[in-house]
Amino acid sequence: MYVTSGDAVTTIAKRITALSGVEAVLTRDEACARFELPPDRVGDLVVVSERLTVIGTNRARHDLSALDVPLRSHGGTSEQQVPLIANRPVAGPPSTRRWRNFDAFDLGLNLLQ
């Protein structure tokens, strides 16, 4: 979400935080630090929904019949942990490593035996 006035960011964030189904409302800086995002690709506010909530306007404004590919939505923090199953042992990954989605390539190419 982009906000035209810097003063409005706090006001808008408070209003969104009060909505049902909203887990968190973060400023650009907060979201980039928390989720390791590039600041030039993030709006003034980032809204994260709760586990069973999808953020949108209303059904009438979302005509899915025009899609020629599956609808993609951004997952909330409840969808961050995804199991990774391999058909062979892993060659001792560091136990302190913080795995992210793009690390699947390193794991698959370099650590599976």
Image (spheres, rainbow, N blue to C red):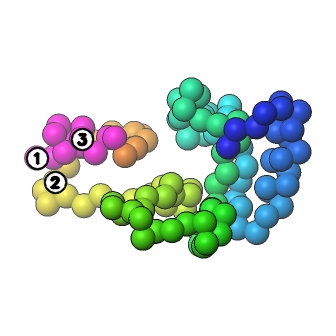
Labelled disc at residue 5: none
* Label ID, residue 113: 1
The residue lying furthest to the top in this view is 40
Residue 28 position within the rendered picture, expressed as x and y whole percent measured from the top left: 67, 34
CA distance for labels 1 and 2 = 6 Å
Q: Position of residue 48 (x, y in %)?
A: 64, 54
Q: Nearer the viewer, residue 1 or 22?
A: 1
Numbered badge on residue 89: 2
What's the magenta region?
102-113
Q: Is residue 111 above or below residue 62?
A: above
Q: Name the secondary structure under disc 2.
A: loop
- Circles 3 and 1: CB distance less than 8 Å? no
Q: Is residue 105 shown left or right of residue 9?
A: left
Residue at (24% x, 41% y) in the render? 105
Prevailing secondary structure of the magenta residues: helix
**Do residues under tags 2 and 3 come within 8 Å of each other at their CB atoms?**
no
Amino acid of disc 1: Gln
Q: Which residue is mark 3?
A: 105
